[in-house]
Image (cartoon, grey):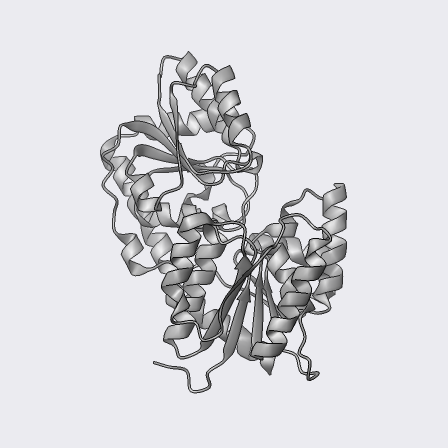
Amino acid sequence: MPSPVPLRILHVLRAPVGGLFRHVVDLARGQVELGHEVGIVCDATTGGERAEAALAALRGDLVLGVTRLPMARLPGAGDIASAVRVRALVSRLGPDVVHGHGAKGGLYARLCARADGRRPARIYTPHGGSFHYPPGTMQHRLYMTAERILARRTDFFLFESAYIARLATSALGSLMTRSAIVYNGLHEAEFNEVSRSGTHDVLYIGELRHLKGIDTLIDALALLRDEGRPLTAVFVGAGPDEEAIRAHAARRGLDKAVTFRQPMPIREAMALARVMVVPSRAESLPYVVLEAAAAAMPLVATAVGGIPEIFGPQASRLVPPDAPEALAGALRRRLDMPEAEAHAEDAALRAFVRERFSLPQMIASVLEAYRTALR
């Protein structure tokens, strides 16, 4: 049913890729269906054909349009020009709410104002972003200084996991006077089980970056090979560290055991192998884990970020990051598990995710946060 008081909502993010982009697309589509006027601002240099297709499918329903402009991943002089363009766009469109996603989207959203002196409610969802840097490092000090400055220009914080909320509270303290945890939500169709007909043993889906711990997975596969298990793996994704990851697989003698595939729809990817592994060093609340759990895909993952919140009662079977032996042990356990026991484990995790990670609830809770900020 449409909302009795429609809002004009502008979402700002950097790269139209991955779980963050999926989150924004789901929010935008759900808000449009409830009668709100919505727009999206994102980077013009990333995303490729998949992003363009997703935005094209939405463009006709977005009253505030789709605006693409250059946004660099790292801070730089170009941020000034991009921030000025976002501010001019906000002045022209006159949204009630500007919702920034990720560190860069949050920067632009919170610097905006309207030429007539009025300003929209400024909402910020970090999606991990700045809070992923280890405390004590130069990057952490730099980004937390920026976050403390920008917190004074934030009307409401939305966190997709209790983990990120704790990090933000530790760094920002009393500056976070208004905040809520709103879990990412899934479509009902995503709870249909995937038929796994592929020939690979192990699957990785995601960006090819050091942060994702793919080198740890390669080391674990090498350990299992040394004990007589010649497993094969398929890595689905792209990213800045692909060359280094390929080289590491070759050094461990796995260049013929590991296949690299370009990004594809996740349900197609899940059909390629028996077990999915998420070996990350840091995460917020990854959609890839939610989607795999919903589809009853066998999962082995690290106990980082919000992943224990997804696993709930099964969180004890998660393994620490940067621990090839532990990851190999978890893979061995799963691959050797009797079929009936494995099916029961997957079904229990899917039931927990279905109960807790609802798309309609996510959309309703985000809109309630907007109303609170506007009040």
Tell me the quadrant of the picture where the N terminus can be found.
Answer: bottom left
Compared across the picture, whether 208 is left or right of 290 comes to right
Give the x, y percent position of residue 361. 41, 68
Count the marks. Answer: 0
In the image, residue 144 sits, relative to residue 174, either above or below, namely above
**Residue at x 48% of width, y 21% of height:** 249
**Residue at x 45% of width, y 18% of height:** 222
Q: Is residue 365 in sight in this rendering? A: yes
**Residue at x 53% of width, y 33% of height:** 213
In the image, residue 358 sits, relative to residue 368, either above or below, namely above
Give the x, y percent position of residue 54. 39, 57
In this view, the residue in front, 333 or 14, is: 14
Compared across the picture, whether 209 is left or right of 328 comes to right
Q: Is residue 121 in sight in this rendering? A: no
Q: Quadrant of residue 154?
A: bottom right
Taking the view exactly as shown, the residue that stands out farthest to the bottom is 4
In this view, the residue in front, 65 or 150, is: 65
In the image, residue 169 sits, relative to residue 347, either above or below, namely below
Give the x, y percent position of residue 242. 51, 31
Tell me the quadrant of the picture where the C terminus can be found.
Answer: bottom right
Give the x, y percent position of residue 313. 42, 47
